[in-house]
Amino acid sequence: MPPKFDPETERRILKAAARLWRTRGERGLTLRAVAREAGTSTPTVYKRFRDKQALRLALAREFFAQLLEECLSSATLEEAYRRYLRYAEEHPNEYRLLWDLWTEVFRPESPRPFRRWVLSQLASRHGGKPEDYTAVFFALIFLTHGASMLVTVPGDEEDREVVHKYFPRIVDAILVHPEFLLETTPRATN
Protein backbone atom coordinates (compact mmCIF):
# COMPACT_ATOMS: atom_id res chain seq x y z
CA MET A 1 0.00 0.00 0.00
CA PRO A 2 1.46 3.43 -0.96
CA PRO A 3 2.13 5.84 1.92
CA LYS A 4 -0.52 8.45 2.57
CA PHE A 5 0.44 12.09 2.51
CA ASP A 6 -0.44 13.93 5.67
CA PRO A 7 -2.23 17.26 4.92
CA GLU A 8 -0.64 18.76 8.04
CA THR A 9 2.80 18.04 6.58
CA GLU A 10 1.80 19.84 3.39
CA ARG A 11 0.64 22.87 5.42
CA ARG A 12 3.95 22.88 7.32
CA ILE A 13 5.87 22.71 4.05
CA LEU A 14 3.92 25.63 2.55
CA LYS A 15 4.27 27.71 5.73
CA ALA A 16 8.01 27.04 5.79
CA ALA A 17 8.31 27.93 2.11
CA ALA A 18 6.34 31.14 2.67
CA ARG A 19 8.64 32.15 5.54
CA LEU A 20 11.71 31.52 3.42
CA TRP A 21 10.23 33.38 0.46
CA ARG A 22 9.22 36.34 2.63
CA THR A 23 12.65 36.74 4.19
CA ARG A 24 15.00 35.59 1.42
CA GLY A 25 13.00 35.66 -1.79
CA GLU A 26 13.97 33.46 -4.72
CA ARG A 27 17.49 32.71 -3.53
CA GLY A 28 16.27 31.34 -0.19
CA LEU A 29 13.76 28.92 -1.63
CA THR A 30 15.36 25.55 -2.17
CA LEU A 31 13.55 22.30 -1.52
CA ARG A 32 16.29 21.31 0.91
CA ALA A 33 15.93 24.59 2.86
CA VAL A 34 12.14 24.19 2.90
CA ALA A 35 12.45 20.64 4.25
CA ARG A 36 14.81 21.82 6.99
CA GLU A 37 12.52 24.77 7.88
CA ALA A 38 9.43 22.50 7.91
CA GLY A 39 11.13 19.87 10.06
CA THR A 40 10.82 17.17 7.43
CA SER A 41 12.99 15.52 4.79
CA THR A 42 13.76 16.65 1.26
CA PRO A 43 12.17 13.47 -0.23
CA THR A 44 8.96 14.31 1.66
CA VAL A 45 8.91 17.76 0.05
CA TYR A 46 9.50 16.18 -3.39
CA LYS A 47 6.54 13.82 -2.86
CA ARG A 48 4.25 16.82 -2.74
CA PHE A 49 6.07 19.32 -5.00
CA ARG A 50 7.90 17.77 -7.94
CA ASP A 51 10.26 20.75 -8.23
CA LYS A 52 10.89 24.33 -7.15
CA GLN A 53 8.54 25.70 -9.82
CA ALA A 54 5.63 23.62 -8.46
CA LEU A 55 6.36 24.97 -4.98
CA ARG A 56 6.58 28.56 -6.31
CA LEU A 57 3.18 28.13 -8.00
CA ALA A 58 1.61 26.78 -4.80
CA LEU A 59 3.04 29.76 -2.92
CA ALA A 60 1.70 32.21 -5.52
CA ARG A 61 -1.76 30.71 -5.12
CA GLU A 62 -1.49 31.05 -1.33
CA PHE A 63 -0.37 34.67 -1.64
CA PHE A 64 -3.21 35.45 -4.03
CA ALA A 65 -5.72 33.95 -1.59
CA GLN A 66 -4.32 36.24 1.12
CA LEU A 67 -4.51 39.31 -1.13
CA LEU A 68 -8.04 38.42 -2.21
CA GLU A 69 -9.17 37.92 1.38
CA GLU A 70 -7.63 41.25 2.35
CA CYS A 71 -9.41 43.11 -0.46
CA LEU A 72 -12.79 41.38 -0.28
CA SER A 73 -13.08 41.99 3.46
CA SER A 74 -13.13 45.73 2.77
CA ALA A 75 -16.24 47.77 3.49
CA THR A 76 -15.72 50.04 0.46
CA LEU A 77 -14.00 50.05 -2.90
CA GLU A 78 -11.68 52.80 -1.70
CA GLU A 79 -10.61 50.67 1.24
CA ALA A 80 -10.09 47.61 -1.01
CA TYR A 81 -7.65 49.42 -3.27
CA ARG A 82 -5.75 50.86 -0.31
CA ARG A 83 -5.53 47.37 1.21
CA TYR A 84 -4.24 46.00 -2.09
CA LEU A 85 -1.45 48.57 -2.14
CA ARG A 86 -0.65 48.00 1.53
CA TYR A 87 -0.44 44.22 0.96
CA ALA A 88 2.08 44.74 -1.86
CA GLU A 89 4.13 47.15 0.22
CA GLU A 90 4.16 44.92 3.30
CA HIS A 91 4.80 41.73 1.28
CA PRO A 92 7.05 42.77 -1.63
CA ASN A 93 8.54 39.33 -2.31
CA GLU A 94 5.11 37.70 -2.23
CA TYR A 95 3.66 40.34 -4.54
CA ARG A 96 6.46 39.97 -7.09
CA LEU A 97 6.07 36.18 -7.09
CA LEU A 98 2.33 36.52 -7.62
CA TRP A 99 2.87 38.70 -10.67
CA ASP A 100 5.76 36.58 -11.99
CA LEU A 101 3.40 33.60 -12.10
CA TRP A 102 0.22 35.49 -13.00
CA THR A 103 -0.50 33.49 -16.16
CA GLU A 104 -0.05 30.22 -14.30
CA VAL A 105 -2.16 31.27 -11.32
CA PHE A 106 -4.97 32.54 -13.55
CA ARG A 107 -6.41 30.78 -16.51
CA PRO A 108 -9.03 32.40 -18.75
CA GLU A 109 -11.66 30.11 -17.24
CA SER A 110 -10.66 30.97 -13.65
CA PRO A 111 -13.27 32.67 -11.49
CA ARG A 112 -12.61 36.34 -10.88
CA PRO A 113 -14.23 37.13 -7.51
CA PHE A 114 -12.49 40.49 -7.06
CA ARG A 115 -13.53 41.68 -10.53
CA ARG A 116 -17.12 40.54 -9.92
CA TRP A 117 -17.19 42.32 -6.55
CA VAL A 118 -15.76 45.59 -7.90
CA LEU A 119 -18.10 45.62 -10.91
CA SER A 120 -21.18 44.97 -8.77
CA GLN A 121 -20.10 47.64 -6.26
CA LEU A 122 -19.68 50.18 -9.05
CA ALA A 123 -23.07 49.32 -10.55
CA SER A 124 -24.73 49.61 -7.14
CA ARG A 125 -23.08 52.94 -6.53
CA HIS A 126 -23.55 54.55 -9.96
CA GLY A 127 -26.36 52.61 -11.66
CA GLY A 128 -26.30 50.49 -14.77
CA LYS A 129 -25.07 46.94 -15.20
CA PRO A 130 -21.84 45.60 -13.72
CA GLU A 131 -20.34 44.93 -17.16
CA ASP A 132 -20.70 48.66 -17.99
CA TYR A 133 -17.77 49.23 -15.62
CA THR A 134 -15.25 46.83 -17.14
CA ALA A 135 -12.97 49.65 -18.38
CA VAL A 136 -13.15 51.28 -14.94
CA PHE A 137 -12.11 48.02 -13.30
CA PHE A 138 -9.12 47.63 -15.61
CA ALA A 139 -8.08 51.26 -15.16
CA LEU A 140 -8.07 50.70 -11.40
CA ILE A 141 -6.12 47.43 -11.71
CA PHE A 142 -3.53 49.01 -14.02
CA LEU A 143 -3.14 51.92 -11.63
CA THR A 144 -3.02 49.72 -8.53
CA HIS A 145 -0.54 47.27 -9.98
CA GLY A 146 1.75 50.04 -11.19
CA ALA A 147 1.64 51.72 -7.78
CA SER A 148 2.18 48.38 -6.08
CA MET A 149 5.26 47.65 -8.17
CA LEU A 150 6.69 51.05 -7.27
CA VAL A 151 6.24 50.53 -3.52
CA THR A 152 7.95 47.14 -3.69
CA VAL A 153 11.21 48.60 -5.03
CA PRO A 154 13.70 48.50 -2.16
CA GLY A 155 15.22 51.81 -1.13
CA ASP A 156 13.16 54.06 -3.43
CA GLU A 157 11.62 56.32 -0.81
CA GLU A 158 10.98 59.17 -3.24
CA ASP A 159 8.69 57.08 -5.48
CA ARG A 160 7.05 55.54 -2.42
CA GLU A 161 6.15 59.01 -1.11
CA VAL A 162 4.74 60.01 -4.50
CA VAL A 163 2.63 56.84 -4.62
CA HIS A 164 1.26 57.46 -1.12
CA LYS A 165 0.48 61.07 -1.96
CA TYR A 166 -1.28 60.55 -5.29
CA PHE A 167 -2.57 56.97 -5.43
CA PRO A 168 -5.51 57.47 -3.00
CA ARG A 169 -6.52 60.73 -4.68
CA ILE A 170 -6.51 59.21 -8.16
CA VAL A 171 -8.38 56.06 -7.11
CA ASP A 172 -10.97 58.13 -5.24
CA ALA A 173 -11.47 60.41 -8.27
CA ILE A 174 -12.04 57.43 -10.57
CA LEU A 175 -14.47 55.85 -8.11
CA VAL A 176 -16.44 59.08 -7.70
CA HIS A 177 -16.49 59.90 -11.42
CA PRO A 178 -16.12 56.70 -13.45
CA GLU A 179 -18.26 58.00 -16.30
CA PHE A 180 -15.34 59.17 -18.45
CA LEU A 181 -14.22 55.51 -18.73
CA LEU A 182 -17.62 54.02 -19.53
CA GLU A 183 -18.44 52.74 -22.97
CA THR A 184 -22.13 53.44 -22.34
CA THR A 185 -23.72 55.76 -19.86
CA PRO A 186 -25.66 53.77 -17.27
CA ARG A 187 -28.96 55.04 -16.03
CA ALA A 188 -29.34 55.44 -12.30
CA THR A 189 -31.58 52.83 -10.72
CA ASN A 190 -33.95 53.74 -7.94
Image (cartoon, grey):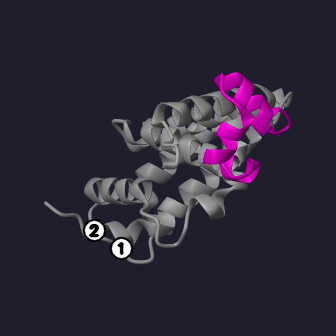
Residue at the image point whose x is 63% and y is 57% from the top: 142
| Of the image marks 1 and 2, the number of the one nearer the N terminus | 2
Q: Is residue 40 magenta?
A: yes
Extent of the magenta region: 26-55
Residue 113 horizontal/vertical position (percent): 39, 55
- Dot 2 corresponds to which residue? 128
Q: Nearer the viewer, mark 1 or mark 2?
A: 2
* Circle 1: residue type: Thr
Q: Identify the image quadrant of the C terminus.
A: bottom left
- Dot 1 corresponds to which residue? 185
Residue at the image point whose x is 45% and y is 68% from the top: 134
Is mark 1 in CB contact (under 8 Å) with mark 2? yes
Q: Secondary structure at mark 2?
A: loop
Position of 142 compared to 171: left or right?
right
Position of 134 compared to 12: left or right?
left
Q: Is residue 76 magenta?
A: no
Residue 166 falls in which quadrant of the image? Answer: top right
